[in-house]
Image (cartoon, rainbow, N blue to C red):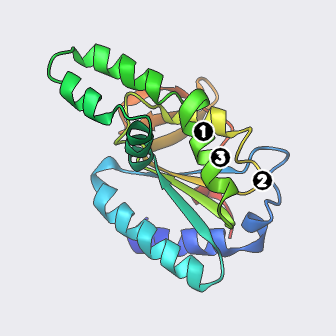
Amino acid sequence: MSIQDRFRHLFAVISGQRFLKMRGLGNEVPFFICPFKPEESVEMERLQRQLVNRLEQAGVRIIGINLYDLSIEILKERNILEQILEMEESVSKEQLKELLQGVLDPEAHLVPTIAAKLARTNFEVLFLSGVGEVFPYIRSHNVLNNLQSTAKEKPTVMFFPGAYSHSLESGASLDLFGRLRDDKYYRAFNIFHCEP
């Protein structure tokens, strides 16, 4: 699908009442994956901004949360961003990853911060982005698993640089960058398979 065709499809699906009223989900959480090739990241960021503008014009309120920006915000709020930046030179990548995984743990820190933002905002759809930028210290399936208790009242669309595949042998998986095939997550729908 071309970027323009994807834009038209996303707009048609997300602005539709079936999507907004979460019909036809069969008691599943209203999570949708918008997969794209990692090399299309710049075009997809532009598409996302245009999509938000067009949806807002159509009366659909969007809240956009970029996981990278949110991570920086959390580190600043906890007064540890400068410490982490200073430590980066003297610790191994593995130690840095473990430190960031702890201070940005989805259950303890990330999702409660998202929940607070959602509670303060009047919106119909949550857009999550920045998945590639926060890898490997934040994994997309961990975010989605922890969001299930918080963001199930309204649809969530995760913009995902990679593939969201389903197979009978291995189930469903989020394949980040089209290479890392270990994030088992089956509760979301591929938005490109949704009818407008």
Q: Quadrant of residue 63?
A: bottom right
The residue positioned 32% from the left and 55% from the top of the image is 41
**Residue 77 shows in this picture:** yes
Disc 3 to disc 1, how far (Cα)?
A: 6 Å
- Residue under the point 52% across and 42% down: 164
Amino acid type shown at disc 1: Val
- Residue 11 lies, with reference to residue 94, above or below; the image says below
Q: Nearer the viewer, mark 2 or mark 1?
A: 1
Q: Does the CB distance between marks 3 and 1 fall below 8 Å?
A: yes
Whether residue 190 appears in this view of the structure is: no
Three-letter amino acid code of the residue under disc 2:
Glu
* Residue at image mark 3: 115
Residue 136 x %, y %: 37, 28
Label 1 CA crowd tier, 10 Å (few <14, some 14–19, many 20+)? many
Q: Residues within 10 Å of mark 2 (few under 14, many from 20)?
A: some
Residue 180: image tag: none
Q: What x and y, as percent, mark residue 156?
A: 63, 54
Residue designated by label 2: 153
Indicate which label's residue lies in the foreground, 3 or 2.
3
- Disc ID at residue 111: 1
SS for dot 1: helix
Work out whether 137 lies above or below 32: above
